[in-house]
Structures are given as structure tokens and as C-alpha cells.
Amino acid sequence: MKKPVKHDIEVEIDSIGARGDGLAKAGDARLYVPFTVPGDKALVRLGEQLGDGYAAHVVKLERPGTSRVEPPCKHFGECGG
């Protein structure tokens, strides 16, 4: 598998993975992006290699997907609730 370039890139989340991360593609690589939903368009920063892809985190949410909602709990993101 080719390694993606190590800088910020813009991606669109296309699905949700088994562990709840949003999934996107960067070239031939799969990206695992926590706290995203299908349809989100985001600027992400690539991180460590994870199995068949790479971890990534959102630098800036460019456009929210239509399934994105406000979390019902004000502590979401801190405890996962």
C-alpha cells in the first residue's frame, strides 16, 4: 500500500467503520477519522498507521454531512457518552 502524504488533506467521509470511526480514502489508503459521519467533508491531519490504513483527525470540518446531529450530552467527546 502506498503511504499518503504526511500533511493536511481534504477528504469526504464515505462510511462508518466497525469501531465507529468515519472512513475516507486518500489515494490507495483508508483513513480512520473519529467523530465524523458519512457526507462530512473535512480537512484532516494524518497520523499513525493502523492496520490497513491510517489514523487521522479533523483539523477543520468544511461541510457537515446530512446525518450529523448535535450530541444529546454536553460531555460527549470527553467521556464518549
Image (spheres, rainbow, N blue to C red):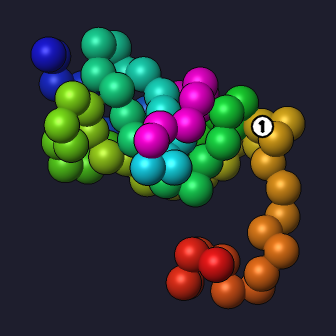
Q: Is residue 4 magenta?
A: no
Q: Quadrant of residue 76?
A: bottom right
Near mark 1 (Cα within 10 A), the count class, few <14, some 14-19 or many ≥20, is: some
Magenta part of the protein: which range?
A: 10-18
Secondary element at tag 1: loop
Q: Is residue 12 above or below residue 65?
A: above
Give the residue number, with chain letter if any, for mark 1: 65
Q: Nearer the viewer, residue 26 or 37?
A: 37
Q: Is residue 12 magenta?
A: yes
Q: Is residue 56 above or below residue 72?
A: above
Looking at the picture, how far across and down is residue 77, in whole percent? 58, 75
Residue drawn at 59 percent across, 25 percent down:
14
Relative side of 1 to 23, left or right: left
Relative side of 53 to 16, left or right: left
Residue drawn at 51 percent across, 49 percent down:
20
Q: Is residue 10 visible?
A: no
Q: Is residue 47 visible?
A: yes
Q: Quadrant of residue 27?
A: top left
Q: Quadrant of residue 25?
A: top left
